[in-house]
Image (cartoon, rainbow, N blue to C red):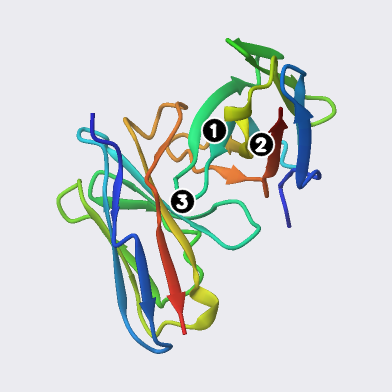
Amino acid sequence: DQQVKQNSPSLSVQEGRISILNCDYTNSMFDYFLWYKKYPAEGPTFLISISSIKDKNEDGRFTVFLNKSAKHLSLHIVPSQPGDSAVYFCAASANTGTASKLTFGTGTRLQVTL
Amino acid sequence: GAGVSQTPSNKVTEKGKYVELRCDPISGHTALYWYRQSLGQGPEFLIYFQGTGAADDSGLPNDRFFAVRPEGSVSTLKIQRTERGDSAVYLCASSPSAGGRGEQYFGPGTRLTVT
């Protein structure tokens, strides 16, 4: 049962344009969401996060939007740069008091072309 | 500063053998996590330590998998009687505390191949 879903395995965007990566979740207990970026042969690197009490969080070129009623979040990258080419993972956690294990989606490979 | 390190970076073993994978978390981080990433999938949670104790081992697939963190720093993931299905990248992550909702810092992973 995939609780976090990234339905687009890949995305190609031209340099300078906006990249939009989408993520859906099914578990209503999730209340904290994160985006990670992964280059080949490296571990995932944290990008940006959002708590369920917010609907938007912005950090430089990266903005995450959360639509709780639709159980959907998206990551916007503006403007896209060639160095953004990587696999992006959406992750979620539930507030269980002590544990904050992450549940990941299957990832979206972003390619930013010149 | 030093990030999370994992050794070895690659491990090839024969089916049925025993393997140990090591993780050195960021100094001072009390929470340590193990994940497994199979080809084409996202990382999948295995076990989480708060200090020396395993606070949540619900992700361990079966009793062939075991992990320890005896001094609250370095952790070892142990796999007995390896099977070809255990082939994956094993990722370790640490965070300053488990109660916080901040990000987890990942190591580069150990790629395990069982032949």
List x then y, in percent, for residue A16.
Answer: 72, 16
List x then y, in percent, for residue B45.
Answer: 51, 53
* Disc 2 + disc 1, Cβ < 8 Å: yes
Chain letter for mark 2, please. A
Q: Residues within 10 Å of mark 1 (few under 14, many from 20)?
A: some
**Horizontal placement of B91 versus B3: left or right?**
right
The residue type indicated by label 1 comes to Asn
**Horizontal placement of B100 versus B27: left or right?**
right
Q: Which element type, helix, strand or loop, lies under badge 3?
A: loop
Chain letter for mark 1, please. A
Mark 1 = which residue? A95
Residue at image location 45% in from the left, 40% down from the top: A99
Residue at image location 23% in from the left, 28% down from the top: B1
Find residue B17 and report its image quarter: bottom left
The residue type indicated by label 3 comes to Ala
| Mark before the other along the chain sequence, 2 or 1 | 2
Residue at image location 69% in from the left, 15% down from the top: A79
Chain letter for mark 3, please. A
**Closest to the observer, B56 or A82:** A82
Q: Nearer the viewer, mark 3 or mark 2?
A: 3
Between the C-alphas of marks 3 and 1, the distance is 31 Å
Find residue B70 and report its image quarter: bottom left
List x then y, in percent, for residue B9.
Answer: 34, 60
Mark 3 = which residue? A41
**Closest to the observer, A55 or B10:** B10
